[in-house]
Image (cartoon, coloured by chain):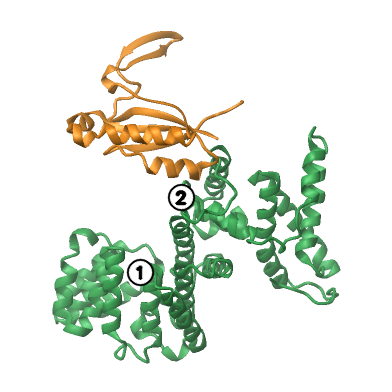
Chain colours: A orange, B green
Amino acid sequence: MKYMLLLVRSDEEWEALSDAEQDYEAIGRWWAENAQAGHVVSGHELEPARTATTVRWQEGKPVVIDGPYVETKETIGGYGIIEVPDLDAAIEIAKTWPARGHAVEIRPVVEGR
Amino acid sequence: MTTFGAPDSRTASAAAITRIVREEAGRLTASLVRLVDDFDVAEDLVQDALVAALEHWPRDGLPERPGAWLLTAARRLAVDRWRREADYRKKVALLESAPVPGSTEVDDRLRLIFICCHPALAREAQVALTLRAVLGLTTAEIARAFLVSEVTLAQRIVRAKRKIVAAHIAYRMPTEQEMPTRMNEVLTVLYVLFNEGYLSSSGQAAVRQELMHDAEWLASLVVRFLPDQPEALGLLALMRLHRARSAARFDVDGHLIVLRDQDRTLWDRGAIIAAAGLVETALRMRSPGPFQLQAAIAACHAEASSWEKTDWHQIWALYGVLLGLAPSPVVALNRSIALRYLRGPRAALAEVDALRGELENYHLFHATRAELLRALGQEAEARAADQRALELTANPAERELLTLRTSECS
């Protein structure tokens, strides 16, 4: 089963952290360990939501908007696609995500529909 | 498991059928879920098989092995259902190899309980699904017990089942590493169920009170298959201790009687001794937890010959340990009640008042304050506190009690 881990954070709070608090070393280790264990399919950190561009359709026509789909304090700061046997395994991996102040939303990926 | 000797030629009583349905429905659902990998299909098959049983058994008498009878019926129904599907032969082959209920090592029902109480499901969904899938209650019965509409309840269950499939919550037992949190989740659900029944007043629908017995039955099932889990033992003991006192909880008119005023001769001494034994067994495993401690406290109360002769020191100490394990203002409130009998109402009131910030909207906070204020002779303030408690409680039996108290004092 593939799951997407949505790494949710407040950009503002994240950027206010010091380098030591952000601890990219621990984050790098997490990716390396889970890749080595064969869990990670892909994943990336994302630039803050203020860099987002959204295309919406209004009356059937695409309109380009500066900003994210919804303005919220917490946004997607990154994602990972993992492949594990079941939800419990995904939860166990999500629990080990080291970045401070994050939440991890686990979404099953639709396969072969 | 319910067993029957010779084929029973008597007309099967409704009570006997109910007992069998409870024992077999979950077991059957669980085996079928594993085989057909689809909650809805498995449940439908079981329900249809039960309907068939309700038609046949009262007429033909109970079969010798009701579980096997039901499985056979469910298989036949599955074959009918799948006949038009392309891969039906494969499915049927799988179904034919289904073990007769009762023959699997870890009980399928236990696995089903863990699935229904998966932490990825909302609490209300866990509760509803457990009753539906493990105990075979109808959505109408569950809806009535939880005082919600049948449509709401049905949606809740459907949503939960869809999530189980879509998110791939596996039909397996938790691993050793997952067990502590998963077990805690299961026990919490059973405790919620139990309390729904326990806290309902004597006048309320029987289906609501029945929840108490359902929860206890499920807890005993968990303990039967996982006897080395001290918290499960603790919860079972706690439920049995509460039930042992249930005859004394309401007066003839259905009014709630508080522990202090209960007629202790109505308590089931044998059940109390047995349950206290469970508590000891659990505590000897040397892994104390909230349920064991609550059971130990309940045992202290149950073993006391009167309210005055209660071992308040022991209870106060147990609440202290409980606070250390699971800090909670409600537990602190309860400890202050024990403190009253050790150091007097003034000391207790000081502790209670310190909890106001957290418990301002909790009716028992105000009810406890009222008692202490009354003990200190501050009648007007006591009455105001009782009034506040009354405004905050939704439970009819508790409302009655508080109404009685405010009117008596006025």
Residue named by callout 2: B119
The reply to whether residue B62 is visible in this rendering is yes
Say which quadrant the N terminus of chain B sits in: bottom right
| Residue B94: mark in rendering | none
Q: Position of residue B297 (x, y in %)?
A: 36, 78
Badge 2 amino acid? Pro
Q: Mark 1 lies on which chain?
A: B
Q: Where is residue B184 in the image (x, y as percent from the top left)?
A: 44, 59
* Mark 1 to mark 2 CA distance (whole Å): 33 Å
When the figure is inspected, residue B154 is found, relative to residue A47, above or below; the finding is below
Question: Is B63 on the left-hand or right-hand side of B249?
Answer: right
Residue occupying image coordinates x 59% and y 60%: B110
The reply to whether residue B390 is visible in this rendering is no
Rendering quarter of residue A103:
top left
At label 2, counting other C-alpha atoms closer than 10 Å, the crowd grade (few under 14, some 14-19, many 20 or more) is: some
Assign a secondary structure to mark 1: helix
Extreme residue in the front direction: A36
Question: Is B159 on the left-hand or right-hand side of B299?
Answer: right
Residue occupying image coordinates x 33% and y 84%: B260
Q: Mark 2 lies on which chain?
A: B
Question: Is B138 on the left-hand or right-hand side of B198?
Answer: right
Badge 1 amino acid? Arg
Residue named by callout 1: B399
